Amino acid sequence: MIFFSNLKYSTTIWFIVMLVGQWIFAAYVAIYHGYKILASGMGSMGGKHMPNGYIDGDFTGNVILASHLIIPIFVIVAGPLQLIPKIQRDYRRFHKWIGRIYLPLIFILSLGGVYLTWSRPRPSFGSIYQDIAITIEGILIVFFAIQTLRFALQRKIKPHRQWALRLFIVASGVWFLRIGYRTWFFIEDLFGFQVDNFFDYWSFASYLIPLAILEFYLQVKKGKNHKSEKRLSILLFAVTLYMMIGIFLAAKGMWLPRVLSVVNTE
């Protein structure tokens, strides 16, 4: 199959699946969180799946959380667009302006996420390891964003694009987290086994594994070795399949029911 042997095709298909999956997630965030906050105020951020969503008396935390639920709508939609070569090449002004908005917002999201992690009471589920994973992810996002901006200002396009890819991958960690554990639980149910404390491990792996795959991709592109390209194409096929399962399960089991609950109450 050409998908297995051609890195260009496998990368393109991975990107299309990722873009569709992230935009589905963005639609969910916009309808379920964004619309509810704009229509009903910050008090609507409470709920079983967000036990520390709204805390009475914590004005600062509530405002940061509200921004943490609204800002991602733009970030999730705009992020993949920044990676499309045609937009980078033929629509440079659009690309630059999106970047000028994207980078400050990603700073706000990452720092806000770390603040919310450590400033609010721990929910009944979760562990300290998940808090540490979120903190490391936030630090990486800030560092990658600074590097992306630095090379853009220096007009060093190649390293700018490489750091922008790293930024995008780590900033997508919250999305990888959700589709990843949905697929993994499906595999556990299918084969009848269970990994204890899987979520603790996946809290780190949800962004470190995609980041490692990206580094492999960058090295393969640099070396232009046919065998390495074929291995990477096979890996991307497996990753894409994993993503497709996770997108379907997350949309069916989480995002769509919650969106319908908002639509049906209007």
Image: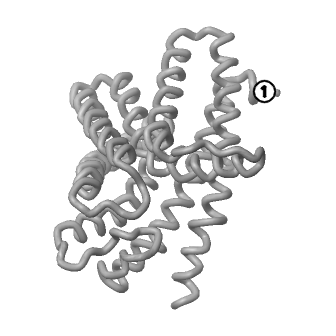
Q: Residue furthest front?
A: 196
Q: Above or below — where is 224 with respect to 210?
A: above
Res 59 seen here: yes
Q: Could you tell me the amino acid type at mark 1?
A: Ile
- Left or right: residue 71 versus residue 169 is left
Q: Using the rendered view, name the quadrant where residue 143 is placed.
A: top left
| Front residue of this view, candidates 181 and 100 | 181
Res 108 seen here: no
Residue 34 percent across, percent down from the top left: 39, 72
Q: Residue at x 27, y 63 (%)?
A: 121
Residue 126 percent across, percent down from the top left: 42, 55
- Left or right: residue 232 versus residue 96 is right
Residue 80 percent across, percent down from the top left: 48, 45
Q: Please tell me whether mark 1 sits on a helix, a strand or a loop.
A: helix
Residue designated by label 1: 2
Which quadrant of the rendered structure holds the N terminus?
top right
Q: Above or below — where is 89 with respect to 19?
A: above
Q: Residue at x 48, y 61 (%)?
A: 26
Q: Above or below — where is 236 with respect to 177?
A: above
